[in-house]
């Protein structure tokens, strides 16, 4: 069974003449322990799909399944708990709390859920991410790459059913970006983590096991073990077909 799936998912923003059909019947599953990138032209529905699958936005029709839980029918208080306890998030803008240290940021979601971090996993993550000497620093004392590595540790330390990464390298230089992408890829292999990443960068998507292409709110392609050239090619074909 897929870790996360959309079943005939529809999202309409607004109503009447100004209604926008951001998702127009998306059916797609994301397997466990795989790294999938979602790509497509600007406005194709990538963010909307991720937000609906993460319980951050409500769908108009269809199902957004996390395991066996249909997020589209859950009340807000359940969605808050699901996001905190079952999903890890990595955003383009890091989204760390400025008044907390790196370590406090990493353990915050677990603290809120009343859970303790697994010591071994915590140690593994901060070593692999090179954060051991940075744990007492606040975000303002860290580089962008270090801040995103703190966000990665925060996302993975709870062993979430899925990590959603929204343009995780968008604010990073290419070297820091490669480190983030390499870490995501390794966490699939070493920890069995399931990752779904939205990106517009074919180089970033080439780190994934699979690329799902969206166009006009629909699934428009599916690439297995893509390289950068295959992704660029598929995007150009999509653009030409419009
Ligand atoms: P992408 O992430 O692929 O760029 P989005 O999911 O952000 O695409 O947007 C899909 C479509 O939905 C676009 O036409 C966009 O303008 C529209 N849209 C997204 N969010 C909103 C919103 N909050 N209100 C109205 N329209 C929106």
Image (tube, rainbow, N blue to C red):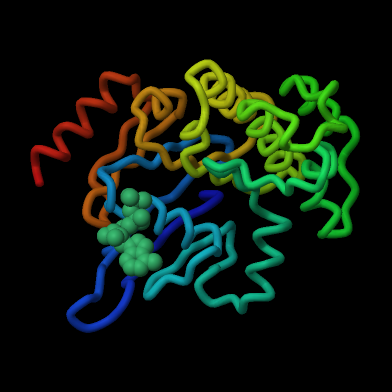
Spot occupied by residue 164 in the image (x, y as percentages of width and height): 55, 46
Most extreme residue toward the bottom is 16
73 relative to 43 in the view: left or right: right
Spot occupied by residue 116 in the image (x, y as percentages of width and height): 90, 48
Most extreme residue toward the front is 140
Q: Residue at x 73, y 41 (%)?
A: 154
Q: Is residue 172 above or below residue 156?
A: above
**In the picture, residue 76 is in which quadrant?**
bottom right
Does residue 169 appear in this view? Answer: yes
Does residue 10 appear in this view? Answer: no
Q: Is residue 108 above or below residue 114?
A: above
Q: Residue at x 47, y 46 (%)?
A: 30
38 relative to 1 in the view: left or right: left
Q: Quadrant of ligand 1?
A: bottom left
92 relative to 144 in the view: left or right: left
Q: Residue at x 20, y 26 (%)?
A: 233
Most extreme residue toward the top is 175
Spot occupied by residue 214 in the image (x, y as percentages of width and height): 28, 47
Residue placed most toward the observer, 237 or 6: 237
Q: How many marks?
A: 0
Q: Is residue 61 above or below residue 219?
A: below
Q: Residue at x 32, y 20 (%)?
A: 228
**In the picture, residue 120 is in which quadrant?**
top right
Q: Is residue 202 above or below residue 2?
A: above
Spot occupied by residue 126 in the image (x, y as percentages of width and height): 79, 26
């Amino acid at each position: 069974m897929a870790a996360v799936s959309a079943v005939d998912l529809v999202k309409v923003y607004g109503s009447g003449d100004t209604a926008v059909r951001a998702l127009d019947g998306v059916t797609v599953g994301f397997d466990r322990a795989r790294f999938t990138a979602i790509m497509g032209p600007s406005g194709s529905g990538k963010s909307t799909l991720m937000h609906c699958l993460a319980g951050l936005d409500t769908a108009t029709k269809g199902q957004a399944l996390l395991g066996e839980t249909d997020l589209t029918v859950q009340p807000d208080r359940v969605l808050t708990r699901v996001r905190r306890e079952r999903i890890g998030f990595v955003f383009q803008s890091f989204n760390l709390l400025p008044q907390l240290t790196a370590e406090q940021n990493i353990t915050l979601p677990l603290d809120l859920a009343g859970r303790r971090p697994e010591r071994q996993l915590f140690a593994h993550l901060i070593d692999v991410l090179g954060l051991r000497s940075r744990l007492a620093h606040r975000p303002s004392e860290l580089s962008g790459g270090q801040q995103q590595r703190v966000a990665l540790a925060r996302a993975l330390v709870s062993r979430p059913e899925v990590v959603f990464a929204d343009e995780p390298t968008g604010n990073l230089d290419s070297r820091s970006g490669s480190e983030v992408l390499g870490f995501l890829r390794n966490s699939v292999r070493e920890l069995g983590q399931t990752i779904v990443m939205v990106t517009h960068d074919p180089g970033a998507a080439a780190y994934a096991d699979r690329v799902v292409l969206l166009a006009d709110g629909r699934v428009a392609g599916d690439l297995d073990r893509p390289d950068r050239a295959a992704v660029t090619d598929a995007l150009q074909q999509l653009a030409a077909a419009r």
